[in-house]
Amino acid sequence: MNTVPSFGVGTFRLKGQTAIDSVRNALDVGYRAVDTAQIYDNQADVGQAIAQSCIARSALFLTTKIWTANYAQTQLVASLRDSLHKLRTDYVDLTLIHWPAPGNGGA
């Protein structure tokens, strides 16, 4: 997707079937932006919901966030690959540093 949709669905605190159902329902009613994060521990659920939808991956804007434990150069790439695997996709449209606060390894 080339543009960021005006509305998106967040997945904070959603896990398991609740996360799957929430994302699927959002996609069914027209949402095309989905936000998740490594720390939410729901990337596999989000990936499952997207995979089970009838929406082409190219029609979605998918965002994830890197958690503080993965900021180190030795962990960053592996953590992103793990996120892609869980999300069942080859790419995300936006990757954010989740919490770039001093003392958290980000800034």
Image (cartoon, grey):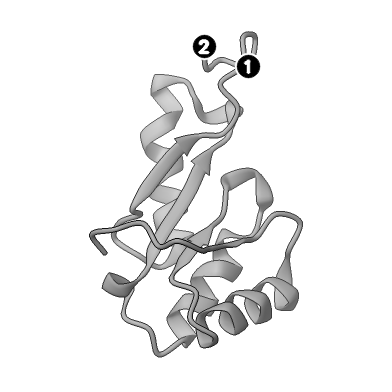
Which residue is found at the position 61% from the left and 16% from the top? Answer: 101
Residue 104 circle label: 1
Location of residue 32 (image quadrant): bottom left
Which residue is found at the position 49% from the left and 69% from the top? Answer: 47
Location of residue 62 (image quadrant): bottom left
* Percent x, y of residue 40: 67, 50
Residue 59 circle label: none
Which residue is found at the position 40% from the left and 90% from the top? Answer: 54
The amino acid on which the numbered mark 1 sits, given as a three-letter code, is Asn
Location of residue 98 (image quadrant): top right
The amino acid on which the numbered mark 2 sits, given as a three-letter code, is Ala
* Percent x, y of residue 57: 32, 73
Vertically, is 14 above or below 36? below
Q: Which residue is mark 2?
A: 107
Residue sitting farthest toward the left:
2
| Number of the front mark, 1 or 2 | 2
